[in-house]
Every structure is written in structure tokens, then in C-alpha cells.
Image (spheres, rainbow, N blue to C red):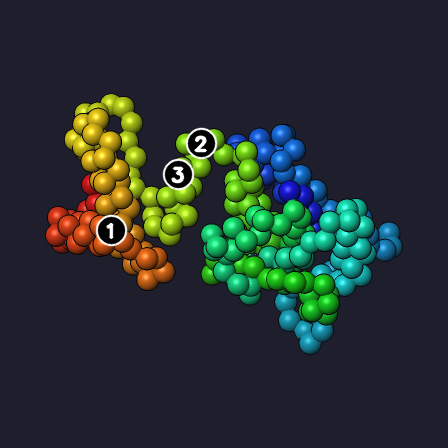
Amino acid sequence: MRVDVLTLFPELIDQCTGFGVVGRARERNILNVCGWNPRDYAEGGYRRVDDRPFGGGPGMVMLIEPLRKCLQAVRSADTEPAPVIYLSPQGQPLTQAKVRELAERRRLILLCGRYEGIDERLLAAEVDEEISIGDYVLSGGELAAAVLVDAVARLQEGVLSDAESAMQDSFEEGLLDCPHYTQPAAHALGDVPEVLRSGNHAAIARWRRQQSLGRTWRRRPDLLDTVTLSSLDRRLLEEFKVQYGSETTPET
Ligand code: ADE
């Protein structure tokens, strides 16, 4: 997969996608992240990329021309067609379903704004989709672009190990993850639940599923409206509610 990112801070994108799973995907050429700086396409000695907003008010707005020329260069760098995605708090919320959809594409073009934003005419002419990573305002689209790159990279074939994929699968079902424990089994902060030490794989799977369901019910009940629960799931959740329902402490 190829991701072209238009940004005034290409180093930021490079750094943010240079570690761990995503860094590995880049090293192995499963993912190619290319940063493009619209300032390289700006005119004049100052290479201006912004100006004051018409109508007055604080802040600056990014100019059409440097972005348009930069986008032209990006498009002609590869024949693979790609949607242009603008990261902004005004966009549609990013969900795992959207991540899955975008991960299928062979190429994405991400547009990052700074200052008060980008001249609306450039957005209307060039942008296919606007995506937000949450209802809060960042100082630019770069961190949001890095989030998107991370989320699509881990879905590329060969990027995750089997164990990581299995974990991903459980979240993909729309439920929150269950708790995890490691050594030591007994600690002043608490003991590891007995069932996880039992060696009974069916009982462990059942416990994990129940914890996932219970956590989702407790912490994100809205997610339960979007998943189809089996009759066993419903039974496990009812059992969880009886066991832990009135407690305000963690589910374990
Ligand atoms: N740019 C600034 N804030 C943003 C957000 N919440 N999501 C995506 N891009 C942004």
C-alpha cells in the first residue's frame, strides 16, 4: 500500500510511522509512506503557504495554489488512482469499519491542514472524503493522518503476527478486549483469576468472551447496539450482570 501525505511537516509523519508494527511494515515494503511539502510548490522568496482569512478574524488559511500544485505532483508520481482524504474535526468519525474499507485500497492521499484550515475552494475541488479522529481539535492533521496510517497498516497482509491478528479479530467483532495478565500469579496488587491458570481452554475462552461482553456493557453500552449477540453471548452477559452488575470496581 502506498500512502502520500501532504503536510507542512513531513518529518512528523515520517517519525510517527517509523516505529513498531508500522515501522516494520515500511521496512518490509508492505507500506510505503511518502511525505510531500506544499511549501516546495509555493512561489516567491518566502514560499508562502497561507494568508489572512477574507472577512477578518484570527488565524491564517492555507492557500489554494501551493496545495493544488503539490497535489498534481503527488498524483503524477504514481498511476494508481487514490481518494484524497482531508483530516479535519469537521469530517466523518473514523471507525474500524472505515479503516477496513480504506485498508483495501492500494493507495491513499492524505491532506493535512494547519492554522485555521484550508481554502474551501481547494477542498471542494480536490477532496473526496473528510475524516475526523474524534471530537477535539488538534493543531494540525498530521497526528490524525498518522493514526489513520497506523490503523490501515496493521490490516495489511503479513504485517501482524498470528497472535496480534487474533487479538485484532476479537476487537473487530465490535466488542472491547478482555483483561490480560502475566507473571507473577500472586501479587500485592491482586491475584490472577483462577480460571486463567486452570489450563482448561474452553473455560478460559468462555471467561474471556464474558469479560469482553461485560466490559463493553459497562464501559461502552452504545457498542452493544451495533453487534449481533449469539444466545450464548446473551447468557454470558446476563451471568456477568448478576455477578458484577452492582460493583463499581473493575470487572475482574
Ligand atoms: N485536525 C485537527 N483536529 C483534527 C481531528 N480531531 N481529526 C482529524 N484531523 C484533525
In the picture, measured across the screen, residue 12 lies left or right of residue 215, that is right
Q: Is residue 200 above or below residue 37?
A: above
Report the amino acid beneath label 2: Asp
Question: Which of the numbered marks, if any, corresponds to residue 162?
Answer: 2
Q: Find residue 52 and report its horizontal and vertical position in percent.
A: 72, 67
Work out which quarter of the rendered image holds the C terminus and state it.
top left
Q: How far is disc 3 from disc 2 in space, using C-alphas?
A: 9 Å
- Can I make out residue 1 in this image? yes
Looking at the image, which residue is at 13% across and 48% down? 243
Q: Find residue 177 and report its horizontal and vertical position in percent.
A: 33, 44
Which mark is first along the chain, 3 or 1?
3
Question: Which of the numbered marks, if any, corresponds to residue 17?
Answer: none
Determine whether the residue tagged by mark 2 lies in a helix, strand or loop. helix
- Identify the residue under disc 3: 167
Nearer the observer: mark 1 or 3; the answer is: 1
Q: How far is disc 1 from disc 3 in space, using C-alphas?
A: 18 Å
Determine whether the residue tagged by mark 1 lies in a helix, strand or loop. helix
- Identify the residue under disc 1: 233
